Image (spheres, rainbow, N blue to C red):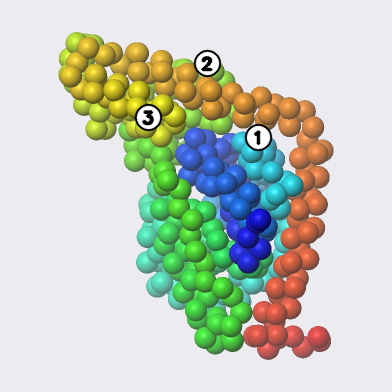
Amino acid sequence: MKNKNSAVLTGDRPTGTLHLGHLVGSIQNRIALQDQYDRCFYMVADIQALTDNADNPEKVRNNVFEVTLDNLAAGVSPQKTTFFIQSQVPEIAELTVLLLNLVTLARLKRNPTVKDEMKQKGFGEDVPAGFLAYPVSQAADILFCGANLVPVGEDQLPVIEQANEIVLKFNALYGETFQKITPVLSTTPRLVGIDGNAKASKSLNNTIFLNDSFEEIQKKVMMMYTDPEHIHASDSGNVGNNVVFTYLDIFDPKKNEVRLLKEHYTRGGLGDVEIKKRLIDVLEHIIAPIRTRRRELERDPDTVMDILKSGTKKTRVIAQETMRKVRKAVKINYFD
């Protein structure tokens, strides 16, 4: 029996195809939650993508299709999850404008997630206002459909915290309208990059994509950071910051065998190539069915777009009802 008392909202910015970090950080949670909850929403966050891609809308438009393909191919089901495009639900924008009145500029600048992403993108005082205010937009994304469960990575927890501040302030000013939002954390909150960088990211070019070919997976794994002191197979090795073992810990289902490999590597006698070949096989086993399903879906783009169109239509009905309640609470329901 599915839980009917809560709603789940999750989504992606359409700025490129998705990678293994998205799979373990959010997609696996989406797949699990859609079997537990009656109301699940997946949002293609194109408006948020435009906050730092306003000069390249074609990139955002093209990737709406790509991120939808990735999610469908990985197992997010349109029969269990409602897919929709953010820009096609104008009520979200209306709610965002109202929520902006409840947040100060100083508070937005203090948000650690925003600060980190501004630093990554090289923004200073010239940061687009839409980018700085995207935690408010995200709060509207969650609240417009009555969602109270949001699968996120650890880096997004400050955004949920700020959204809950907005909920408290709105309810205090206008009466109980919105529920508190609960983040649902992945067991792998942040996947390291293949280069050992703290985060796998498209912009850092250190990721393995969900549509990578076997040859691409092979090439990327063979480039992975291991132990620079482990020159010969006979040398003892360090598994602590070894990216290959980090990935094996996450993706290899045979945990006991991985434990024995770590012990062997630590005492010496196990080469980097051997463990990399094992990881290539593990990742290919995960990615191959996603890649195959994705290619099938690519051949039927009309069906993919129909999933987005019908889901967006369904979502708008919910959004309109939410905004009727919000306008009444804020006393701007002049003609009702």
In the figure, residue 87 lies in which quadrant? Answer: bottom right
Mark yes or no: residue 47 visible: no
* Camera-side mark, 2 or 3: 3
**Residue 248 occupies quadrant:** top left
Residue 32 to residue 269: above or below = below
Q: Amino acid at mark 1?
A: Ala
Of the numbered discs 2 and 3, the one sitting upstream in the chain is 2
Q: Amino acid at mark 3?
A: Lys
Residue neighbourhood size for the residue with mark 2, other residues' Cα within 10 Å, grouped as few (<14), some (14–19), many (≥20): few
Label 3 sits on a secondary structure element that is helix
Q: Callout 3: few (<14), some (14-19), or many (20+) C-alpha neighbours within 10 Å? A: few
Q: Toward the viewer: 150 or 45?
A: 150
Numbered circle sitting on residue 238: none
Residue drawn at the location 45% of the way across and 53% of the way down: 185
Which corner quadrant of the image does residue 262 belong to? top left
Foreground: 311 or 57? 311
Give SS at disc 2: helix
Q: Are marks 2 and 3 in contact (CB under 8 Å)?
A: no
Q: Which residue is mark 3?
A: 255
Q: Nearer the viewer, residue 135 or 214?
A: 214
Residue at the limit of the structure toward the front, as seen here: 1
Residue 234: x, y in percent?
19, 11
Q: What residue is shown with label 1?
A: 73
Label drawn at residue 215:
2
Answer whether residue 298 is visible to the viewer in this image.
yes
Q: Residue at x 63, y 60 (%)?
A: 3
